[in-house]
Amino acid sequence: MTQTRYSRTRSPEPEKEKTRGGGGAAMRVIVPLQGVVQGRGGLVLGSIIPCALFYFLQFYLKRHRNDRDDQNESNSPGQNPTTRSPSSGQLAELPVLTRNLSRALLSPRSPSGPVSVSGRVGGIVKGADSPFYVGLSRVKEDLYDELGNPNGVIQLGLAENKLALDLVKDWLAENAEEAILGNGKELGISGIATYQPFDGLMEFKAAVAGFMSQVTEKAVSFNPSQVVLTSGATPAIEILSFCLADAGNAFLVPTPYYPGFDRDVKWRTGVEIIHVPCRSADNFNLSIAALDRAFNQAKKRGLKVCGIIITNPSNPVGNLLSRETLYSLLDFAREKNIHIVSNEILAGSTHGNEKFVSMAEIVDLEDVDRKRVHIVYGLSKDLSLPGFRVGVIYSFNEEVLAAAKKLSRFSSISAPTQCLLISMLSDTKFVQTFITINRERLQRMYVQFVAGLKKLGIECIKSSGGFYCWADMSGLISSYSEKGELELWDKLLNIAKVNVTPGSCCHCIEPGWFRFCFATLTEKDIPVVMERIQKISETCKLNS
């Protein structure tokens, strides 16, 4: 066969061609140095020395390669070097090897350090250092158990309701399998294993809307077509932040507020939060005057305020917004031409005689300004199902609903979860029984817990909703400051082994307030908690 330039036969001529080709490529790098080095001795420094270095390098590389080839041959068992195939010998001398080695040594490019990540990562990681999250992590490491770990940390920092979890457990044990598989119908596996709408099944939207009406005692009839479902209230709040404000814009949020808002509203949207301070002298109730001051201050700073975020019932205080306050909020939003986001995730977790009023009821009665009102809801609190990850956006604004439906692709609820909960929420007897018993147990637990704190000289703001006692422990802090508050928090966590949320995590402007979530306890846990708090209380009083 006629020999071509791609022949794999060994001969001295191709070897020379390779050497000349490689040298020419490298010389194009070195020869221009002649023009760089000027003055006396320029010829020597700019040409002769670099060339000598280049040829020495080529000689070293070639010798090193040959030595390795010889070593490989001697280490190959059962192979005779004299009978080596032409192809195997030539493959060892392919120019790729020499070129890679030369390029690695001659290239000015080299790793300059560890690979970088986005600037957002630092802010997110730093945010996890808040005492709120530190306390939650501490509990995971050493969770209290009456029998298994009696000296562990008692969880009072997580807004989780376990008081009626037995009712949910009983219903699931009896109905879960049939609920998920469609009662043996053909829907079965095709209904849970195939793609479904990201914003939720219409049947599930109807079931959730019906449940929302029940927790408001039929005061509002919620329309399923105005519902967008998400995997929890957190993405619901974030989606609304995307839809209502641009990066650099802001929301007014009354303080103290749920610590997670800093994460939910700000992390990925670039939206800011303007604090609206509420004070103990007013039982931490929201005033329109405080909203107006915060709005004007933001305007002076060049911030565009796009809306107000309220939580009703309040977290962490536990108070309810009155009908008059809701009307005033709507008037304020109309005057400033901004939105209202009403977080009503605890609407069904009220206790006592005070009645909950939804912002949807106010809008229904007013029949104006509907497009500026948006409601956040979920099943984590009122149905004791935080692990099921079900959140709700209920909006009167068609543009917001259209955008939210598309954004829900990043936070959709699994089809099996939806099928299961359709069946649960459609069981009207179970739902009504659950709501009634849950409220009774919340009220009983709240009364006992507040009484226990009162015996220790710790007063709480009157609460009518949620799982919280908002307690004034300012008499136990070493100094009336955030530092003094956090010192007491540290003692409670690491000495008394009780995890609570310090008010500074909720941006309370008055030091010494703490949030206690009592719905994670059983009644027999209350004396244990009080005994642990009492030890810290006595120590603080002795040192004061």
Image (cartoon, helix red, strand yellow):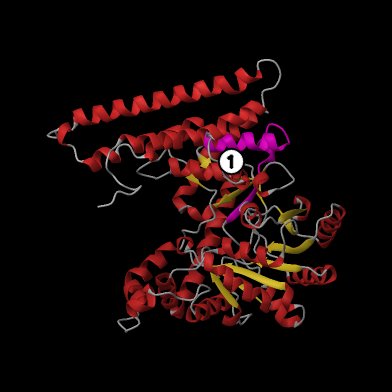
Q: Residue furthest front?
A: 2
Question: Is residue 303 found left or right of 30 in the rendered image?
Answer: right
Question: Is residue 82 found left or right of 475 in the rendered image?
Answer: left
x then y, percent, for residue 48: 56, 20
Report the magenta residues as a range. 468-494
x then y, percent, for residue 187: 35, 82
Rendered image quadrant of residue 159: bottom right
Is residue 382 something one can see in this rendering?
no
Number of numbered discs overlaid on the protein picture? 1
Q: Secondary structure at mark 1?
A: loop
Q: Nearer the viewer, residue 391 or 498?
A: 391
Q: Nearer the viewer, residue 98 or 434?
A: 98
x then y, percent, for residue 211: 53, 76
Q: Looking at the figure, which quarter contains the C terminus?
A: top right
Amino acid type, residue under disc 1 in the picture: Asp
Identify the residue position indicated by label 1 in the image: 129
Is residue 122 on the magenta stretch? no
Q: Nearer the viewer, residue 239 or 372?
A: 239
Q: Residue at x 66, y 42 (%)?
A: 473
Q: Residue furthest top?
A: 40
x then y, percent, for residue 112: 56, 33
Question: Is residue 218 found left or right of 195 in the rendered image?
Answer: right
Q: Residue at x 52, y 41 (%)?
A: 498
Q: Height in image: 118 above or below 63?
A: below
Q: Residue at x 37, y 73 (%)?
A: 193
